[in-house]
Amino acid sequence: MDNRLEIITRNAEEVVTEEELLALLNKKKEPVCYCGYETSGDVHLGHLVTMSKLKDMEKAGFKVKVLFADWHTWLNRKGNWDWIHEQTSIWEETFKSFGLKSTEYVLGSSFERSLEYIDDVFALSLDTTINRALRSMQVIARDIEHARVSQVLYPFLQIVDIKYLGVDVAIGGIEQRKIHMLGRELSSKIDYTPFVCLHTPLISSLTGPGEKMSSSKPESMISVRDEEPAIKEKINKAYCPMGVKEENPLLQIARLILFPKITGAFEIKRSEKYGGNVEFDSYDSLERAYLSKEVHPMDLKKSVIDYLVEIISEIRSI
């Protein structure tokens, strides 16, 4: 049980609640977890964080479901239907290339138009103020001050999705917290048990503190469509101050994407003049060396580039 719990919770920002998670693991042989994605823009490193967590959940014995939220994408004004459906096909192949081959992939519009589903959405809307619904969307919607009514409905759809997919554990980046907390509070209104929430960290923008990676800002992120020259250029320009951990995207990429993905030690290659090659068996050991300035930012960047090029090349080979 301890090993299973460690796999589930590693690199998690929070679990709500760990006591409920333990009870679930003791009660159910194959619990169901899910993560939902708007299929807008390219898959980027920020998405690989939750994708890595879904692989952890498979290792821990969970039934994993991925919701490609096409209707949510449309309601959140991210694109027209033809473009959304084209993107959804690309996303599914990308997820499979990352190693999520036994995952169940579900298209939101395949069940979200049923009468029972709509009834549940309306039931939730009766018990929620407009301000509360908008607050839950603050981190997700691009322009909350000018939000459309469709975006007020968005949290209710996400909560009802959890019921109709039979979810025990909802996974998402920490930006999903407000919607998930609203769902835990309101789940009894639609005859569903409060679900466990597992939230992952967000990767900081490559351009510097104060923002996170975003598909709408290409300079802030690395896409799985980026080829080696683009990856090198973005990483070499990235914010990575010597000996600093806070909002350092290079350390975050190493912790949340590279260490879970690579086999063997993390290697930093450097000339003998600067101490020669060095290997790290854990992220914590790399972080300690970086904070004590035993590893230079440029050496860290070179290694991150090498590993990312390899990982993204495998994904892009679809």
Image (cartoon, rainbow, N blue to C red):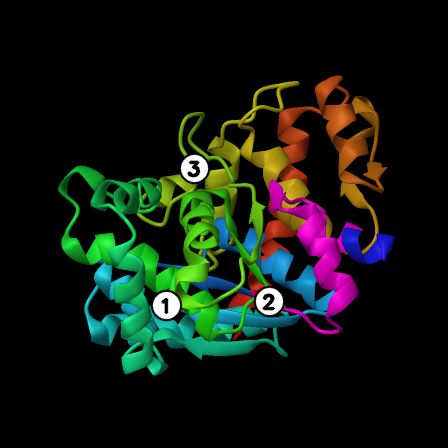
Is residue 89 visible in the rendered structure shown here?
Answer: yes
SS state under label 3: loop
The amino acid on which the numbered mark 3 sits, given as a three-letter code, is Lys
Q: Position of residue 194 (x, y in %)?
A: 53, 57
**Measured along the vertical axis of the image, is residue 275 above or below residue 303?**
above
Circle 2 Cα neighbour tier, 10 Å, few/some/many (<14 / 14–19 / ≥20) = many
Magenta stretch in the rendered image: 6-33
Q: Which badge, 2 or 1, is on the more N-terminal residue?
A: 1
Q: Name the residue rendered at 46%, 69% in the picture.
A: 163
Q: Name the residue beneath numbered marker 2.
A: 98
Residue receiving disc 1: 69
Question: Which residue occupies 52% across, 75% down?
Answer: 318
Q: Secondary structure at mark 2?
A: helix
Quadrant of the frame with the N terminus: bottom right
Where is residue 115? Give x, y as percent. 27, 81
Residue in the foreground of this view, choosing between 180 and 219? 180
Q: Is 286 on the left or on the right of 89, as rendered?
A: right
- Seen in the picture, residue 142 relative to 103 is either above or below; the reply is above
Q: Please give the label number shown on residue 212.
A: 3
Tell me the SS state at disc 1: loop
